[in-house]
Image (cartoon, rainbow, N blue to C red):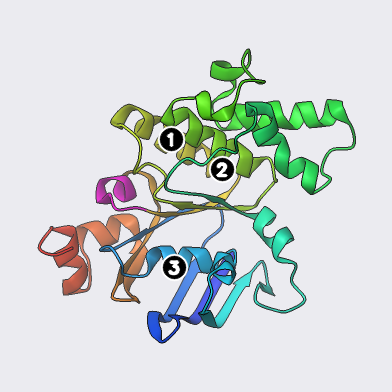
């Protein structure tokens, strides 16, 4: 099966500092791929390459090829606004807009012209909240401000907002690190459910989380991918001593 994303020899520089060194990684469709490794090893930098978020950082230069659905996303012809709708992003800290719950989710369908009328927009908002496992909790509060929700609910609202843009791929940069264990369990359950319809790439500091929810794991160290494989294999019989050392807690 063709991977939905293929990164070939990707290097990233912030000014003179090299943050990624010749990374090669294929991402299979409708699977959860976890990126693990110590802080500052390049996993979030790599994640941000996949929807060109690094374009917004001054002095950042990306080399190599990233192919999404057969297209080179760094081709000058590619519209990055459209790309970021197809490749959604959920950040570490929940970041709802200072608008109502409804307007947070309606934002992408409005700017991308996905709904022809108010009824269609209403249906898209409700469907996205339902997919994000949030509708039952907020359906009587749609016009309250999104920031009035609890941390875990805010993160699910941000997931609903990403889903409303009708992406194929969702990038998640440590989506549970600001949440308590109960909210984390809810978000993890949601991520597992979403895999049926979306390809998910998650950066996580929690090896337990990677082991619980992902099918593929890539271990980053000092800007390189040291090892990549089926999650179970990477955790139970890693091929590289550095992976072994990180997983057993000897470094990191």
Question: Residue 175's spot in the image, x, y percent?
Answer: 42, 45
Q: Is residue 89 left or right of residue 24?
A: right
Q: Quadrant of the C terminus?
A: bottom left
Residue 21 visible in the picture = yes
Q: Secondary structure at mark 3?
A: helix
Question: Residue 115's spot in the image, x, y percent?
Answer: 84, 38
Question: Residue 140's spot in the image, x, y percent?
Answer: 63, 12
Residue identifier under label 1? 187
Do labels 3 and 2 touch, CB within 8 Å? no
Which residue is drawn at the image coordinates 22% and 72% (left, top)?
239
Question: Residue 71's spot in the image, x, y percent?
Answer: 69, 73
Which residue of the protein is positioned furthest toward the right in this rendering? 116
Query: Of label 1 and label 3, which has the lower sequence position?
Result: 3
Image vertical order of residue 243 relative to residue 175, above or below: below
Q: Is residue 252 left or right of residue 92?
A: left
The span picked out in magenta is 204-211
Whole-number angstrom distance, CA of label 3 to CA of label 2: 26 Å
Main SS category, magenta section = helix
Quadrant for residue 99, please give it.
Answer: top right
Query: Of label 3 and label 2, which has the lower sequence position?
Result: 3
Residue identifier under label 2? 196
Query: Of label 1 and label 2, which has the lower sequence position?
Result: 1
Whole-number angstrom distance, CA of label 1 to CA of label 2: 15 Å
Which residue is drawn at the image coordinates 30% and 49% (left, top)?
211
Which residue is drawn at the image coordinates 20% and 63% (left, top)?
237
Between 132 and 41, the one lying in front of the other is 41
Mark 1 or mark 3: which is in front? 3
Which residue of the protein is positioned furthest toward the bottom in this rendering? 16
Mark 1 or mark 2: which is in front? 1
Which residue is drawn at the image coordinates 33% and 50% (left, top)?
210
Image vertical order of residue 51 relative to residue 188, above or below: below
């Amino acid at each position: 099966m063709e991977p939905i994303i293929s990164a070939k020899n990707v290097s990233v520089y912030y000014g003179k500092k090299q943050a990624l060194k010749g990374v090669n990684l294929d991402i299979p469709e409708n699977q959860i791929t976890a990126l693990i490794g110590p802080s500052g090893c390049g996993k979030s930098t790599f994640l941000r390459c996949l929807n060109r978020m690094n374009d917004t950082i001054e002095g950042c230069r990306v080399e190599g090829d990233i192919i999404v659905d057969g297209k080179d996303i760094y081709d000058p012809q590619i519209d990055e606004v459209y790309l970021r709708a197809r490749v959604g992003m959920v950040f570490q800290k929940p970041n709802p807009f200072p608008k109502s719950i409804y307007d947070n989710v309606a934002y992408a369908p409005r700017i991308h012209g996905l709904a022809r009328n108010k009824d269609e927009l209403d249906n898209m908002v409700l469907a996205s909240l339902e997919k994000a496992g949030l509708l039952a909790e907020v359906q009587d509060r749609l016009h309250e401000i999104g920031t009035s929700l609890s941390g875990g609910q805010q993160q699910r609202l941000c997931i609903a907002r990403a889903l409303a843009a009708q992406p194929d791929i969702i990038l998640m940069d440590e989506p549970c690190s600001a949440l308590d264990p109960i909210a984390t369990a809810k978000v993890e359950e949601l991520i597992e459910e979403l895999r049926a319809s979306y390809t998910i790439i998650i950066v996580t500091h929690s090896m337990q989380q990677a082991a619980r929810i992902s099918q593929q794991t890539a271990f980053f160290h000092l800007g390189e991918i040291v090892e990549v494989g089926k999650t179970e294999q990477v955790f139970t019989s890693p091929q590289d001593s550095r992976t072994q050392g990180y997983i057993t807690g000897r470094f990191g």
